[in-house]
Amino acid sequence: MWPAGDDFITYNLSFVPAIITIDPDNKTMATGTLNPVTSPLDVNIISFTGNKTATGNQINLSITNDEPVEKVILLKSANGIDFSDAGLMTKMNTSGAVNNYRFIDVLAFSPVTFYRAKIFAGVKEEYSGIVKVQQSVSNTLTVSPNPAADVVNISFNNTNREKVTVRVINAEGKVVIESATNNDFIHFDISNLPAGIYIAQVIKPGQVTDTNKFLVRK
């Protein structure tokens, strides 16, 4: 009930609540104010760019700051929505008040990878915008059977019998199987892999040239 003229609301409950949440989306109390726990970083993001190179996707960040930056973590995503940590960005050089960071992602998703930077300074943090890097790979790689449970046969174009690296990457972007070959096919035992979606890639030399997805089903 809400007594007339009073500045509080009283509810008579028949039980002891385990938790109380008051207007979590700030809809009912839309005329109120919110005090953030932490203040934004005193950081100006000059540029955040990405491009494909022979060794992987290169991501560059340039920022100015009036307080020391503890670290910068690069986040990556296959859909631009669900991001996971790719790793720490390396501080390259400092020119006056500008700090430059770089990260080379050798485990890029296909056909596109989205990136954003998470900047830390003490208890404060700030996010950059999102950049997209497109992969230009062929679809000559085939995986059979698909879905698979025990063994997969990966075939690809390798007419000149170059030494190539073939790897399998899980949904988190981690390499779970990797091997080198001069053939245009390879067999992998996947009996120990958990069920889920995986990506097979061919790298030659140092650049992803073929890629395809396959499903592991138990």
Image (tube, rainbow, N blue to C red):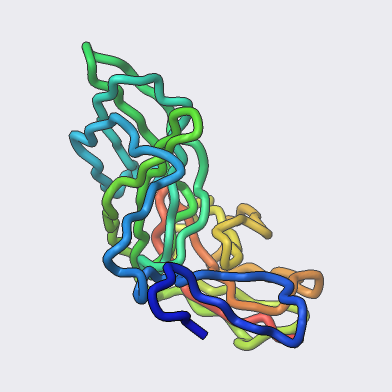
Q: Residue drawn 50% across and 48% down?
A: 86
Q: Quadrant of residue 19?
A: bottom right
Front residue of 66 and 113: 66
Q: Residue furthest right?
A: 192
| Left or right for 12, reference 116 | right
Q: Nearer the viewer, residue 67 or 198?
A: 67
Q: Residue 49 placed where, x, y %?
A: 24, 44
Q: Name, please, the residue furthest toward the left.
A: 46
Where is residue 199 shown, x and y percent of the image? Answer: 54, 69
Q: Which residue is rendered at x = 57% and y = 79% of the image? A: 214
Quadrant of residue 74 within the rendered picture: top left
Outermost residue toward the top in this view: 96
The residue shown at (63%, 68%) is: 186
Q: Nearer the viewer, residue 156 or 44?
A: 44
Q: State whether residue 20 is above or below residue 147.
A: above
In this rendering, is residue 140 above or below 73? below
- Which quarter of the figure has residue 168? bottom right
207 to the left or right of 93: right
User: Which residue is located at x 49 percent, y 53 percent?
Assistant: 107
Q: Nearer the viewer, residue 194 or 190?
A: 194
Total number of numbered labels?
0
Rendering coords of residue 65 (x, y %): 28, 24
Q: Position of residue 46 (x, y in %)?
A: 18, 34
Q: Say whether residue 42 is left or right of residue 139.
A: left
> Could you tell me which quadrant the C terminus lies in?
bottom right
- In the rendered structure, the answer to whether residue 174 lies left or right of residue 149 reads left
Taking the image as drawn, is residue 197 in sight?
yes
